[in-house]
Image (cartoon, rainbow, N blue to C red):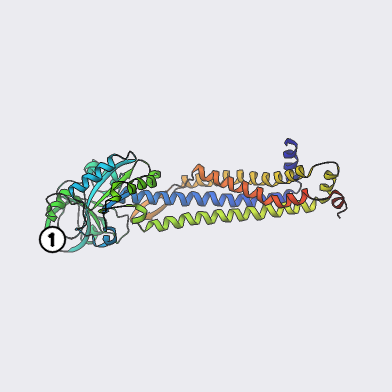
Amino acid sequence: MKNLIKIAFRNLFRNKRRTILTSSLITFGVVLVIVFGGLAISFKSQMVGILTNTAMGDLQIHHNGYVESIDNLPLNLTLSGTELEKVEKILSDIPEVASYSPRIKIGAMISNYAQTSNIRMSAVYPKMENRTVPEFAKRIKGNIPNPDEFLKQGEILVPENLMKGLSLKIGDEIVLVATNKDGSVNAITLRIAAMTENVFGPSGKDGYMHIEDAQFLLRQDQPEIVEIAIHLQRYDQLNKVYSQLKQSSISKDSKFEVHTWEQLSPFASIARIVDLLIIVVKFILISIVLVSILNIMTMSVYERISEIGTIAAIGTSPRRILSLFLIEGSAMGLLSTVAGIIIGLGILWIMNISKIDFTFGSMDLSLAPSIPASEVLVVAVIVMIVSLFAGLQPAYKASKMEPVDALGHN
């Protein structure tokens, strides 16, 4: 076998120009997959991280039927104190759950006594919210010394676009007007503690207030929770925890429903498109490798018919001839893969140094492209398998040649 490998590598460079051109094409395909995969995976991961760690959480629990009418922010589909305790007990028994945050979601009107606009409010317990969406504090523009206390009773966080639209400043007082589930119109005066960047673009109008202020505004004796956001120890535990919650008494009770962020956010469609594009690029790589290896090995067999006849005539078995050509095809795939991975990772490293800046919503971000080691391994395995498969037909043809016919070939 050792001699076969030496002969195979030597034969690869009998026609150096053709080998280099073919290897360069395969290398380009590998570089394309590595670089595009690194960019796409990093973009997807960062966007998912922004949505889950600054706003939505990894999963959410609502009253049954709430999500279908979520645009109206209904206040009659809420979780009572007893139901909240039941959910909290289940969540505390799941070790993968790092934290959770009860929320009251309401639609309201905000006024500076001169102008009025609509706003969507999330009423939260600041400490629980900060633990559940740990990067939320990065969206806050203002003096917040302790992220666990980004909001106090009597304060409100107003989105940046409303601050500008209503000519508001931090420290100003505003009036928040809302209708409770009984149809009663109520108002509360709050002070602007800070403003927030909106991850949902210029049309987003999402503010934050303390949950006890929401109770006062809505005339609630106890918090009537609209949603519970959940943060996991690790994001890759999402499907596992979702399955556990679906099998728990939460889902068996018709009053509750569980959703992952993917089921609630339109960005999930973009994430699936990114995954599809990665698959398409891998398919292009497979096509490049298949055609390239098949072409060069077919040419190699055709040019060496007399040589094949000679080695067959002196007693070389068809199996060794088959192995020789398979090793040649695999060797070309291996060399091209190693070169492509090195170049591709080098390009990603350069991109990391130079930084790629872009805007998501109103947030300015820097993309640091990287690719998991598992993806690099998948690319290498794909190329090697396709190289072996592409060389199989020419190698089989060579091994089945009759010595007499091969030696008589001109």
Q: Amino acid at mark 1?
A: Asp
On screen, residue 379 versus residue 388, left or right, reads left
Among the 4 quarters of the image, the one containing residue 92: top left
**Place of residue 312 in the rendered image (x, y in percent of width and height, measured from the top left):** 83, 45
Among the 4 quarters of the image, the one containing residue 217: bottom left
Q: How many marks?
A: 1
**Place of residue 53 in the rendered image (x, y in percent of width and height, measured from the top left):** 33, 47
Q: Out of 37 and 103, give the one closest to the viewer.
A: 103
Question: Residue drawn 24% across and 43% down?
Answer: 88
Q: Tell me the quarter of the image containing the C terminus.
A: bottom right
On screen, residue 215 versus residue 320, left or right, reads left
Question: Residue drawn 73% across and 37% down?
Answer: 1
Q: Out of 370 and 268, give the one closest to the viewer.
A: 268
- Residue 58 appearing in the image: no
Q: Is 265 above or below relative to 131?
A: below
**Place of residue 281 in the rendered image (x, y in percent of width and height, measured from the top left):** 54, 55
Q: Out of 201 and 227, give the one closest to the viewer.
A: 227
On screen, residue 113 versus residue 334, left or right, reads left
Q: Is 259 above or below relative to 131?
A: below
Q: Residues within 10 Å of mark 1 (few under 14, many from 20)?
A: few
Q: SS of the residue at dot 1? A: loop
For mark 1, what is the residue? 182
- Residue 287 appearing in the image: yes
Question: Residue drawn 26% across and 54% down?
Answer: 254
**Place of residue 324 in the rendered image (x, y in percent of width and height, measured from the top left):** 74, 43
